[in-house]
Amino acid sequence: MHLETERCILKPPSPDDAEALTQFYLENKAHFAPWDPIPPTGFYTIQHWKAKTAEHQQEYLSGKSFRLRIFLKQTQELIGLINYTNFERGAFQNCRLGYKIASRHEGQGLMYETVLASLTYVFQELNIHRVEANYIPENRRSAQLLKRLGFQELGISKTHLRIKGEWRDHQMSYKLSEQWQETEA
């Protein structure tokens, strides 16, 4: 299974991506640092990403997550990630969205293009009712992306996540499948 956009191919995790993922994180270490938790020991190794990829495949098979790698069609370069995690089924039908893109590919509309395609799949094929996305208020790019995608702000979650050793507030936002259907119509 994979999704295609005008400029990108979105693929599920594969053990073959471990080297590219390691390189992706190494090249963007400083770029991601303000927004990410402190990485565990071994995070920047191929062995780590081989193990994580296997874990991500199991999560998908058990219905707990839906993760995608973003590749440029033109070069096949791994340029980003989109993660739908913490699937809650039953009466809730909810998941959480996270994403990241290589610094040199920011500002080109690639994240909008790929998140848009993946949201369509999550709402239509995975039958999710609500997608949540949380971000540090200073992360203007995330705020702009989610607004453009039609996410609604819910409020600030105080000391929501530990980033760089400090508990940080996060802006909470969400998108409902009904809102998505209106957008698609």
Image (cartoon, rainbow, N blue to C red):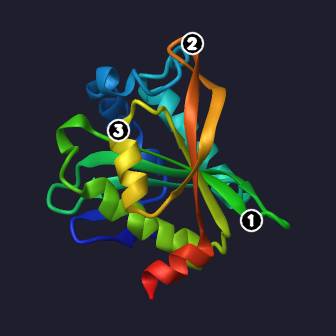
At 35% from the left edge and 61% from the top edge, which residue is drawn?
114
Percent position of residue 161, x then y? 62, 26
First along the sequence among labels 2 and 1: 1
| Disc 3 packing (10 Å; few <14; some 14–19; many ≥20) | few
Direction right: furthest residue:
91
Q: CA distance from mark 2 to mark 3?
A: 20 Å
Q: Is residue 52 above or below residue 112?
A: above
Which of the numbered marks, if any, corresponds to residue 23? none
| Disc 1 packing (10 Å; few <14; some 14–19; many ≥20) | some
Element at badge 1?
A: loop
Tell me the quarter of the picture where residue 5 sits: bottom left
Q: Is residue 158 above or below residue 8?
A: above
Which of the numbered marks, if any, corresponds to residue 93? 1
First along the sequence among labels 2 and 3: 3
Q: Amino acid at mark 1?
A: Gln
At 23% from the left edge and 57% from the top edge, which residue is drawn?
109
